[in-house]
Amino acid sequence: MENLEELHSFLKNSIENANTQAEIDDIRIHYLGRKGKITELLKSLSSIDNIEEKKEFGKKINEIKSYCENSLLEKKNLISEREFLSSLEKNKIDITMPGRRPKSVGVNLLTKVEEEIVSILTEIGFRVVEGNEIEDDFHNFEALNIPYYHPSRDSHDSFFISKDHVLRTHTSGMQIRTMMETPPPIAVVSPGKCARRDAIDSKHSPVFHQVEGIMVDNGISFNDLKGILELFCKKMFGDKTQIRLRPDYFPFVEPGADLSATCVICGGSGCKTCGGEGWLELMGAGMIHPNVFKHVGYDTNKYTGFAFGMGIERVAMIKYGITDIRMFYENDIDFLKQW
């Protein structure tokens, strides 16, 4: 019994002097572990023959064990609270200090370029029409003289969300809707987001932005198209900008043309940006195909018109010398704040 009193006294002093969680854990293992002193004493009960003595001895050991468990838990909670308060004091925040301002930039470059394109075209006389990013098959393909066997109508090239609906591959659908609702003369541009199943590389992205325009009236000619696009390019890239029109094919125009502008880096003399040619491809254009007029109910003997379309990313890359389209979508603050 004297050994038990001594054990209890030593245990009490050890717990009172413990100042860390590690010391508490050491005491618990030393007394209550599988080979701890209290555990060994409980095991030794089987060697006591006298029943009354065994009961008394067992009672004392269980009292010490209960004291040990409760005292360790109480001291552990006390140390945890002390460490928590110490941490709060150490990491104290002065709420009167001014906060750190997050990095921010101005208007996104693509938005800036889109607004500039639209501003130039509205000054010329176009009005803006906008629509949904989900388009039906008729307005996105059929009415634009794109036949059922055309590759762009394949699920490998476009994002179909149902049999008859697709994430629009261009904004031309709004031009069809406008022509179906409005008799000539009309001059509209339609900016917006588009989607195609393009592999991501420095020049292509499955999500991109376009501005497309049409003008329809009596006597509209290819000369009108050339003059307006030349004026647009000079306002967009500078008065010295020249344009080049070469024959090209698009299902919804006939004749069709590919428009290139003189390189903004070398001024047309040839450099790495333009591949030494002095020209940068900018947009597609042409005279609206008679089949398109038939779909919208326009008299092909009375009216003519032209259409054009350009990628906003493409215009931004040419104007600001950006070589990789992916830079627009990486949310790099250092890149975006340059503009």
Image (cartoon, helix red, strand yellow):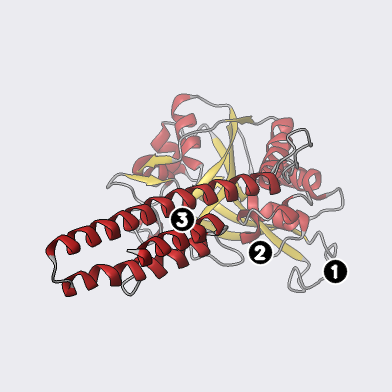
In this rendering, the label closer to the viewer, 1 or 2: 2
Any mark on residue 196, and which? 3
Q: Secondary structure at mark 1?
A: loop
Calculate the distance from the C-alpha at mark 1 to the C-alpha at mark 3.
34 Å
**From this viewpoint, is residue 252 visible?**
no
- Residue 325: image location, x then y, percent: 63, 60
Q: Nearer the viewer, residue 34 or 39?
A: 39
Residue found at x 41% / y 59%: 8
Q: Nearer the viewer, residue 96 or 89?
A: 89
Q: Nearer the viewer, residue 251 or 8?
A: 8
Circle 1 crowding by C-alpha within 10 Å: few under 14, some 14–19, many from 20: few
Any mark on residue 324, and which? 2
Q: Is residue 214 above or below residue 59?
A: above
- Residue 204: image location, x then y, percent: 56, 62
What is the total number of numbered labels drawn onto the structure image? 3
Q: Nearer the viewer, residue 324 or 265?
A: 324
Q: Quadrant of the N terminus?
A: bottom left
Question: Which amino acid is tagged 3?
Answer: Arg
Any mark on residue 248, and which? none
Question: Which amino acid is tagged 1?
Answer: Ser
State the residue position of label 1.
269
In this rendering, the label closer to the viewer, 2 or 3: 2
